[in-house]
């Protein structure tokens, strides 16, 4: 005689012999700060009731490859406890925990509704009608990009956008690390035009704004699913064709309200000269110039090096753990970009070295992510340049570089490909006689409010400069000043289990 199927809404701690006929709505992995992994998932029965499920570390190997999102199944046996997750995904007051005696059988169950999302109303978010321990599903059209913060000391990658619902309500949405990089990769792809509708699952709601969770959130951008397509079709026709732009406020964030323009800060303490004059430089010199990226200069080291997980210094041995000079104990060094590219201006050509943060900001992904993707696709040759790197080429930019004549190369410190920014540098500052058109020493009397001098900058040697790069609409990259960023840590993302993941899960550890 078979067991009767129990309803999810009736689950309590009175027994362990539960029999559930459910659809797995979502499943995700969580790694705590000790590196211990477990699984969590949400299941729903035929009545639409849901409960959060926990599969502990000691049962992980048994179930990790068996459980698939959207599958229907019969689950027998499990312990029931109060739902004490720091961040809850559904209303049920209990959580269901797999035991050693838990069984699960995949079976087609037509009476269980298909996978769906439970979207939180923007009006309720703005009115504060949200539980502080609940994670919500969010859908909206990106109306503006407020701020983009790159990976820098003490900071994490984050993209802040304004989302608008179909009623015209707007909320801020912060996309952290891999989520922010995924958005940038989509946004900067020239093939993607028109409105951007994003769907974010398991979003944390706080103070009228939302952000992804460290584990469990999924970010869907203009994907071909009913929810996104239906939302897109209801947008006004003119809005469907408009690609969101970056706000003027975000473009001026880095100047901190200073009386000096972004261009003036960019050229401070540097010699502005054309590329043709680089060959005349005899000593290391901080310069500003305009050039177009031409082609890769393939070196014997390939397109990346292995470095510290915190700073950008090179690891002494990519296969061994060590303690970095920055104090970080590195268990496994990670790939970081170091790409040599020939740039040109007219008939002149020179070799520029692009470092980790600049490349990651333009490409929208870290070297670690790109390298791992190649390995997963069967390519483990470090000398093979992935196609994604082509995004670095054929871009006209203004560069702040340290020219190193001994090596016939220039190390890129900052860059910007905003058309107006490049034109102003090219027309007003670049001259042919090795002299700038402005007395830069007189430009900013209070040097403490500006960047470090060229002499200090040269002291970093071959390590990646700790510059901050902000992306502007489409392909543009604008530079921010140190120490004047908006600090997004206060509204940071979280993890469903309430503990942050190990650094191996981050898109790019702070450098």
Image: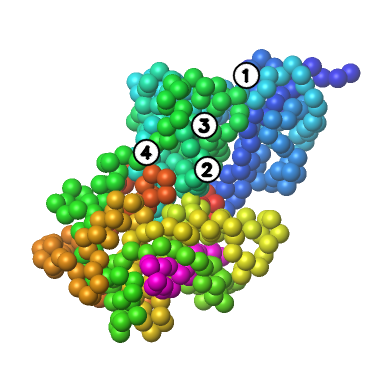
Q: Between marks 3 and 1, how big is the CA–CA gap? A: 22 Å
Q: Which mark is residue 245?
A: 4
Counting residues from the start of the chain, the first of labels 2 and 1 encountered is 1
Counting residues from the start of the chain, the first of labels 3 and 1 encountered is 1
Q: Is residue 418 left or right of residue 502?
A: left
Q: Residue 98: name its quadrant.
A: top right
Q: Between marks 4 and 1, how big is the CA–CA gap? A: 40 Å
Q: Nearer the viewer, mark 4 or mark 2?
A: 2
* Residue 298 position in % (x across, y down): 55, 72
Q: Are dots 2 and 1 in contact, CB under 8 Å?
A: no
Q: Nearer the viewer, mark 4 or mark 1?
A: 4
Q: Nearer the viewer, mark 3 or mark 4?
A: 4
Vertical placement of residue 97 versus 291, above or below: above
For label 1, the SS is loop
Q: Which residue occupies the extreme front position in the image?
A: 347
Counting residues from the start of the chain, the first of labels 4 and 1 encountered is 1
Counting residues from the start of the chain, the first of labels 4 and 2 encountered is 2
Q: Which mark is residue 199?
A: 3
Does the segment drawn in magenta span residue 368? no
Q: What span is colored magenta in the figure?
A: 329-351
């Amino acid at each position: 005689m078979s067991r009767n199927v129990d309803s999810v809404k009736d689950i309590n701690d009175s027994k362990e012999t539960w029999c559930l006929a459910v659809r797995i709505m979502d499943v995700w992995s969580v790694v705590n700060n000790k590196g211990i992994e477990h699984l969590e998932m949400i299941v729903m029965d035929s009545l639409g009731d849901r409960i959060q499920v926990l599969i502990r570390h000691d049962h992980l190997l048994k179930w990790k490859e068996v459980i698939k999102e959207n599958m229907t199944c019969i689950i027998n046996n499990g312990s029931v406890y109060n739902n004490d997750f720091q961040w809850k995904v559904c209303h049920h007051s209990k959580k269901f925990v797999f035991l050693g005696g838990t069984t699960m059988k995949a079976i087609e169950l037509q009476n269980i509704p298909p996978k769906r999302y439970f979207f939180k109303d923007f009006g309720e978010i703005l009115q504060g009608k949200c539980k502080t321990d609940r994670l919500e599903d969010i859908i909206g059209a990106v109306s503006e990009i407020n701020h983009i913060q790159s990976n820098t000391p003490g900071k994490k990658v984050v993209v802040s956008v304004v989302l608008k619902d179909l009623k015209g309500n707007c909320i801020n949405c912060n996309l952290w690390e891999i989520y922010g990089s995924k958005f940038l990769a989509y946004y900067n792809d020239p093939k993607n035009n028109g409105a951007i509708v994003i769907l974010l699952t398991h979003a944390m709601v706080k103070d009228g704004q939302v952000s992804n969770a460290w584990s469990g959130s999924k970010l869907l951008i203009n994907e071909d699913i009913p929810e996104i397509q239906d939302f897109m079709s209801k947008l006004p026709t003119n809005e469907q064709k408009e690609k969101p732009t970056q706000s003027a406020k975000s473009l001026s964030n880095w100047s901190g309200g200073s009386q000096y323009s972004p261009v003036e800060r960019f050229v401070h303490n540097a010699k502005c000269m054309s590329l043709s004059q680089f060959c005349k430089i005899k000593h290391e010199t901080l310069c500003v110039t305009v050039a177009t990226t031409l082609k890769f200069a393939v070196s014997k080291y390939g397109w990346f090096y292995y470095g510290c997980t915190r700073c950008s210094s090179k690891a002494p041995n990519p296969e061994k753990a060590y303690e970095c000079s920055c104090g970080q104990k590195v268990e496994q060094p990670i790939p970081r970009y170091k790409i040599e590219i020939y740039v040109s201006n007219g008939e002149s050509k020179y070799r520029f070295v692009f470092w980790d943060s600049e490349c990651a900001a333009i490409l929208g992904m870290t070297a670690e992510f790109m390298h791992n993707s190649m390995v997963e696709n069967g390519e483990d040759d470090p000398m093979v340049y992935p196609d994604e790197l082509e995004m670095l080429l054929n871009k006209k930019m203004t560069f702040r570089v340290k020219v190193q004549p001994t090596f016939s190369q220039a190390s890129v410190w900052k860059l910007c490909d905003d058309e107006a920014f490049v034109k102003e540098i090219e027309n007003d500052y670049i001259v042919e006689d090795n002299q700038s058109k402005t007395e830069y020493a007189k430009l900013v009397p209070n040097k403490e409010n500006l960047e470090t001098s060229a002499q200090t900058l040269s002291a970093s040697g071959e390590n990646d400069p700790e510059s901050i790069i902000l992306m502007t609409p489409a392909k543009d990259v604008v530079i921010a000043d140190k120490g004047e960023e908006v600090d997004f840590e206060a509204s940071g993302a979280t993890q469903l289990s309430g503990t942050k993941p190990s650094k191996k899960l981050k898109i790019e550890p702070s450098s």
